[in-house]
Amino acid sequence: MPSSFDFSHPPFDCLSPGERQRVADTVDIGYYTPGTAVLTPDTPATHMHVLIKGHVQHIEGGEVVAVYGPDDFYGARATMAGHSSGVFTALDEVIAYLLPRATLQVLIADNARFSALLFADISRRLSAAAENSHSHEFLSLMMVRVRDAFVRKPFFVDGGLDLVSVCASLSEHGLTNALVRDTGPDGQARVGMFTTTDLRDALLRPEPPGALAVREVARYDLITVSPDTELFEALLVMIRHRVHRVLVREGEHILGVLGQLDLMSYISNHSHLIAMQVEQAANLEELQRAARQVDGLVALLHRGGVRIEVISTLVSELNGQLFSRLWALIAPPELVAHSCLLVMGSEGRGEQVLKTDQDNALILRDGFEHPDLAAVAQRFSDALAGIGYPPCPGQIMLTNPLWRQPLTGFKTTITDWLLGHHPDGPMHLAVFLDARPVAGDHSLLAQAQQHLRTLFSGSAPLLARFAGAVDQFNEPGHWWDRLGGLRGRDEQRFDLKKLGTFPIVHGARALALEHGLSCLGTRERLQALASAGQLDATLVRDLVDALHYLMGLKLQHNLRQQALGEAVHNEVRLSDLGTLERDLLKDSLAIIKRFRQHLHSHFRLDAL
């Protein structure tokens, strides 16, 4: 076998050294000219194929279901069955590794993850894929540099200050240590550190604390690291010198103090430290610095194999705190008290990961007015744009008077969206149903949403009209029919939101509305429907798995777009997907198709 067999691609990356050697000892190479039938129902299937060069088209029941390219594999099921149910044809000159059935049988029997990635249903395949990618989260975080961690701002006291005064100052600021500015015996300026441990030792001295200068008990042999030091190295420095804190210095400028607890907290729970910085932000600049770390956290967690639903939940919590803090910095206290700030859409559902456009609104208490409301809304929108949230193209945000109204006005608008002829009414209702309060009086949103549910209650035609939006982005025919040609496959694009997640999200939203469920997340809505006996549990499991797969695939490609300096979007090229990714995408589309059929039957959409 050529030494270049690539074990880095799934499912071969989960093989043990011994299993890889078995592949190396038994694999062969096949050559096929353009137009050759590589596998057919009429010939025995004896080998699984892994493409080295060229493209192979798979036709099943007269329909093109896939086109495979370099590093893709095909024919595993056919090999185990001994025959193929479809026709695999070389579109150009093809060279492929041929893995014999005997080797494949041993790998499947000995390696459960390899078997799951090849043959299991979507739930087991997704679980196996997630387990296979999960590793090195700790290592990834440790490769972060000190400047990216939580470095506490320096708090200085004069060396001549007595210990009682120093402790009073520490208590006032909620600190446990201070940097001491002093002059050494040689007349040179020096910086020391005073901690509660030094206070313990000072209390054992004969002088009373009120008569003891902090310079007498501070330590001046401080260990220093630069902000570009990797966290792993900073931790080693602490261990090596048996200290719990190091001074972070850039040239002669002291940036602050990095504590061992903060360092370990960053590694184990980076999100907690971002939340702390958001909470303590005293101005927009400090808040922006904290907000900029969120995307970095997302990338680190994704590289570490953390599940997409965990990442989205963390981001949702952080963003909620960020919006709340930003509103408190910009809006006058009386406006905060007499209104409810809400986020909507995927942000409201807790399914937003990377920053997209602004989707927010403000409900005012009836009778309350603020003369500068429009200016405050504009400052809030501008500040969000500065953090990385561009204005919403559809103007679904505070700067639009439609989305900042008193409670009574919102109820009237909701009624018009539902019963009137507003062209964007159904989608505005969908966005509003996903609203989540982040600041102010949360009861205002609860009252508005209860009004919306009351309007829908018991009205099958209105519910059907609302649910019908599930077909808004549907495309005629079988989507995979368009993969017939080699060039077409290379150029083919798939919208992960419109054709992928939207039907699941909106279908769950419509069913939750019908049954009076107040939960916001798509997964929570689906699981609540299953628990109530309103949706088949197996379908719910598959829908949740498909949703998470599509969200993860979108995040993966969005991070790649960011790294390349491209604008983040929802489209993915099929040529960028590996075999397993395309198979899982097909599985997900099949599940979505089943869900659409259920919705059409349940809401009688074909009769509309």
Image: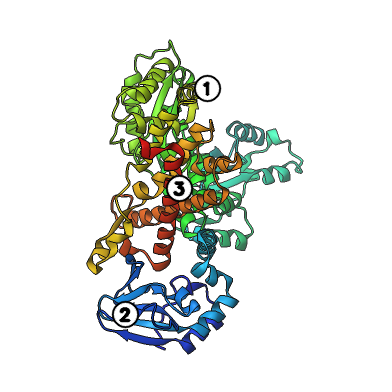
Residue linked to disc 3: 595
SS under mark 1: helix
Return the residue found at the far left. 487
Choose between 270 and 198: the one closer to the eye: 270
Q: Earlier in the sequence, mark 1 or mark 3?
A: 1
* Residue 513 image offset from top left, x and y in percent: 49, 32
Type of the residue with mark 2: Ala
Q: Quadrant of the C terminus?
A: top left
* Residue 411 image offset from top left, x and y in percent: 42, 19
Q: What residue do we see at 54% from left, 63% from top?
A: 131
Q: Are marks 1 and 3 in contact (CB under 8 Å)?
A: no
Q: Are marks 2 and 1 in contact (CB under 8 Å)?
A: no
Residue linked to disc 2: 37
Give the foreground label among 2 and 1: 2
Type of the residue with mark 1: Ser
Position of residue 136 relative to residue 260, above or below, is below
Q: Earlier in the sequence, mark 2 or mark 1?
A: 2
Type of the residue with mark 3: Phe
